[in-house]
Amino acid sequence: MHVWKFGGTSVGKPERMHSIRNLITGDDTRKIVVLSALSGSTNALLAIGESLKANNDDEANRQIDTLKAHYDSFISDLYKTAEGKAAGQQIVDNEFSFIRSLTRIKPFTLKQEKELVAEGELLSTQIFQAYLAEEGVPSTLLPALEFMRIDADNEPEIQYTEQRLAEMLPQHDDKQIIVTQGFICRNPRGEVDNLKRGGSDYTASLIGGAIRAEEIQIWTDIDGMHNNDPRIVKNTFPVRELTFDEAAELAYFGAKILHPSTITPARMFGVPVRLKNTMDPAAPGTLIADRTSDQVFKAVAAKDGITALYIHSTRMLNAYGFLRRIFEIFEKYKTPVDMLATSEVSVSVTIDNTERIQEISEELSTFCNLEEPDYDQTIICIVGNFSADNEGVAVRVFNAMKNIPIRMISYGGTESNLSLLVHSRYKAHALNALNDGLFSL
């Protein structure tokens, strides 16, 4: 069985849903099809929630009317038969009746907001499955709220998902296509919750791992993961093969095509992930698996919003336990560290969450001297095959970066990543320089 995920732009128009129907029925492979909300829906629902939190009910109802009109038009264009249109309209009317009921709950809390935002996926999947039924495709809707759950730390309970899917899937052995929602889940209290923004990729990977799928396919509007950011750099190209580790590094450090958490369940169970383009289905896309090509440089990604902290202490010299004390403070305030560089008496770290930087700095100051943090930094991540036997890797990178100031370097932690810290004003220059220096023929 395959797991195929389609994002908001892939289902955002009726003609796109028609295309997806052709894609998923193009062979005899049974598929679990994971759908995001229609493009724009999640933002619209969040805006409605903001109006309700501000007690601006009139504005919220106006926004609901606008969004429902969009769905009414969508239904009219999607279905061919009177019966299909009636079924689709009934779905829209039911879900918007629930949305309107949330406007009467005071105060409007986070619980209601999560229920509201979940409506995007609940609408798209019901509408699509009803369309498949109209087309005569053997299909069913498997509600994600019945098998997807997070724990008290907001982490998915994959064993629960395995158990529930093992119980539920055999009941639908006669169905070629099983449609379900991305993003949404339940929390330990049984309430509607979610896997955070971009979580539909994560849903697909969790399902794929849980059922030990043959392959997970993530369908977007770009033909695979590119070797650089196509919004900034010209003449980028899709990377045909990546290892799980390489893809995870790129996703974490800014490659927008893939949610950073997606790789973990797939890697855990050895399920290949293929990135495909709904606008160009024939394009091979990118395959993420245990194997990869021997190409030295694979891709470059950039992560903005980074802050660098510089920690100095003469007590670090020939001492043990110093780094432990530092990282216990970051752990205490639940602040992950991205990059690390050390010398005899200093440590430099980068963080992307400055919410607790004041508390962290105050505790570090009890046994260290701190420089003023550097804000507005960018991590440039170069990913490839950097095994110890490959000569000249660092030389090529630093030659490409010779005219750009570098604040920190991280190299050797893995065989797939070399990271550089630069001020964000040099980001575009750095990405273009690396593209020219590492990928030009």
Image: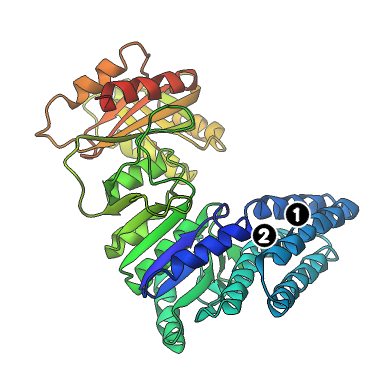
Colour style of the rendered protein structure: rainbow
Residue drawn at 56 percent across, 64 percent down: 18
Depth check: 347 or 414 in front?
414
Tell me the amino acid under the disc marked 1.
Gly
Mark 1, secondary structure of its residue: helix
Which numbered circle lies on residue 199?
Answer: none
Residue drawn at 71 percent across, 80 percent down: 83
Q: Is residue 27 shown left or right of residue 198? A: left
Which numbered circle lies on residue 49?
Answer: 1
The x, y position of residue 13, in whole percent, is 63, 56
Spatial separation of the CA atoms under disc 1 and disc 2: 8 Å
Q: Image quadrant for the N terminus? A: bottom left
User: Against 228, is 406 above or below?
Assistant: above
Q: Residues within 10 Å of mark 2 (few under 14, many from 20)?
A: many
User: Against 109, is 353 above or below?
Assistant: above
Residue drawn at 81 percent across, 53 percent down: 63
Q: Is residue 211 shown left or right of residue 103? A: left
Q: Is residue 257 shown left or right of residue 121? A: left
User: Against 393, is 404 above or below?
Assistant: above
Tell me the amino acid under the disc marked 2.
Val
Q: Image quadrant for the C terminus? A: top left
Q: Residue furthest top?
A: 403
Q: Residue furthest right?
A: 58
Please say whether residue 156 is visible from this viewpoint.
no
The x, y position of residue 401, in whole percent, is 32, 17
Q: Is residue 249 shown left or right of residue 278? A: left
Depth check: 52 or 98 in front?
98
Q: Quadrant of residue 25?
A: bottom left
The x, y position of residue 71, in whole percent, is 73, 62
Q: Are marks 1 and 2 in contact (CB under 8 Å)?
A: yes
Depth check: 207 or 405 in front?
207
Mark 2 lies on residue = 117
